[in-house]
Image (cartoon, helix red, strand yellow):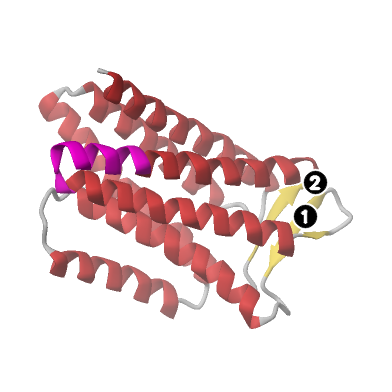
Amino acid sequence: MTYSYLIPDWFFKFGIGMEILFGIITISIAIIAFSCYKTCREDSLKRFGLGFLLISLSYLTWAIINIILLKDTGTGYMILTTEGLPLIYISSIYLHMALFISGLITLAYTTFKIEKGELYYLLLGLGLLVLASSFNKLLTFRILSVFLLTFISYNYILEWIKNKNKKTLIIFSSFLLLLLSNLDLVFSDQFYSSYVISHILELCAYSIMLFGLVRTLKK
């Protein structure tokens, strides 16, 4: 089975630059969360940081994949496809997916606000098994991402309705934008504009979240 997506030629360098930037922003979010954990010893902050650390690694892996594997079609856009690729390159694409899904599962687990390793093991194991056993891994990856982001967004909006906490609203807004960006990526193998729009939404999402966390530290 071939998995692919399209990128317009003019966005190629911007896209890779943005993916590296996403990696930097998400690892910054992770560092801030770990720093806050050292201060208040709240386990949810540690898990929040771990989730974004995994997502950061997935973006950096994706940037490297795009630099090495994207091909010019000569029709105004570039394409990544697994057809005919050596196993090591295909494995790197799957590693990106596994890291991103693991990060989202960790963030979803954080919303439970409990420390129960068995539950985390179950969620992580099921998510990765679904991805590994899927025939169309790219589509399954997108559906899993949308499902997990929907769950995370739903929990944060419920928490905001309950407590009216401004920080919670900022985090919800960020995850909602990430949800929209991943919904858009479902069509990235058919419309290259989807890839561009999703990157813009992701940039807005991570920028809002980083800004919100930095403001929290300053208070």
Task: Quadrant for the N terminus, please.
Answer: bottom right
Pointers 2 and 1 in contact (C-beta within 8 Å)? yes
Could you tell me the amino acid type at mark 2? Asp
Q: Which residues are magenta?
A: 31-43
Q: Name the element at disc 2.
A: helix
In the displayed orientation, state which residue is furthest to the right: 74
> x%, y% of residue 32?
33, 37
Q: Is residue 7 visible?
A: yes
> x%, y% of residue 178?
43, 41
Res. 78 mark? 1
**Residue depicted at 48% across the width and 56% down the height:** 57
Q: Is residue 5 visible?
A: no
Q: What secondary structure predominates along the stretch shown in magenta?
A: helix
The stretch drawn in magenta includes residue 3: no
> x%, y% of residue 121?
22, 70
Asked whether, in this view, residue 5 is left or right of residue 156, the answer is right
Q: Is residue 62 above or below residue 205?
A: below
**Residue depicted at 48% across the width and 39% down the height:** 25
For marks 2 and 1 on the same chain, the one whose residue lies earlier in the sequence = 2
Asked whether, in this view, residue 156 is left or right of residue 104, the answer is left
| Residue behind mark 2 | 9
